[in-house]
Structure formats: C-alpha cells, structure tokens
Image (tube, rainbow, N blue to C red):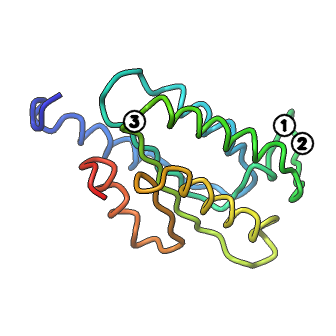
Amino acid sequence: MKRNEDNGRSLQEVANFTRKMKPISGLANIDAAILESLSMFSSGSSKKSLVIIGDVGPYEYSSQGKNYVNCADSVREQRLISAVKQFAAREEKFSLFTLYTGDDTPQFACPSQTQVFFTNLASLLDDNGGYSADISKLFLFLLKGVLGEK
C-alpha cells in the first residue's frame, strides 16, 4: 500500500487499538504471544515489524490456570529463539524491537534472565533489531519499524 493511500485509516486503527489496551500484572505466555504474532503476518515482500514490550520471559507463564516460574527453562527460550530465527530467514524485511520494562525488584521472577533474553532476541536480526530498557526509545522503534530506517 502506498503512503497515504488509505487517508490515514490504518494509522487510526492502530491508535484506536492501542488506546483500548490495558496493562495488567502477572505472568504471561510471552512465547505463545510471539509465535501467534509471527503467524499473523502474511507472506510477501512488505515490511514486517514486531515490537515486544514487557518484563516477562519464556520462563514465567500460566498454563491450565496454574502459574509456573522456572528461570532455568532454556528449552522454552531456545524454542522461541529458533522460531524467530526461522521466521527472519524467510522474511527479508522483518524487524524486531524489544523494550524491557522490568527491574530487579522481587515482584519480577526472573529479571536478569528476561532482560538478557530480550537483548538476545533483538540481536538475532542485527541491524533489523533493537533492544532498550528505556521507554523513551519506544517511539524510535516504532518509526524504525514503519520507515525501515537503521
């Protein structure tokens, strides 16, 4: 789609979607969310960007109403990294940006592993990836994803 071809409707849809989002605390299946996000992209030559914002890694998740935390769960982590690598290998115009929002307080189950995971995930894509723990970088990531600038 050419720039302004839809008179800004796409941008308005994104703005409306983000206004409806409500953050909640707790564990999340980030690996399932990332895999689902990747599956939502259609094949083709258009630019694809994924921005991951959070403080939960693949070692902190819920399943069947129970919460699980295993900071040493490298299997879930490696499975997700492998899936992102495979997707990026197929999609030349794919970019991935991660914004770590956690800190070292006890409420976060695996902060050091999660921060390293976010860093490693973004570094998989070299110049097409970016990592930060600074929320002010979010807008920069979004612009890079849309414009494809390095």
Residue under circle 1? 63
Residue at 12 percent across and 31 percent down: it is 2
Crowd tier of the residue under label 2, counting other residues whose Cα lies within 10 Å: few below 14, some 14–19, many 20 or above? few
The image quadrant where one finds the C terminus is bottom left
Quarter residue 53 falls in: bottom right
Q: Where in the figure is residue 19, as x and y percent of width and height?
A: 39, 49
Residue under circle 2? 66
Crowd tier of the residue under label 1, counting other residues whose Cα lies within 10 Å: few below 14, some 14–19, many 20 or above? few
Residue at 46 percent across and 44 percent down: it is 50
Residue at 24 percent across and 42 percent down: it is 11
Amino acid carrying label 1: it is Ser
Q: Where in the figure is residue 113, as x and y percent of width and height?
A: 76, 65
Q: Where in the figure is residue 88, as x and y percent of width and height?
A: 50, 37
Front-lying residue, 93 or 33: 93
Residue under circle 3? 92
The image quadrant where one finds the N terminus is top left
Query: Which numbered disc, 2 or 3, marks the residue closer to the eye?
Result: 3
Quarter residue 107 falls in: bottom right
- Between marks 1 and 3, how big is the CA–CA gap? 34 Å
Q: In this view, does 40 lie to the left or right of 33?
A: left
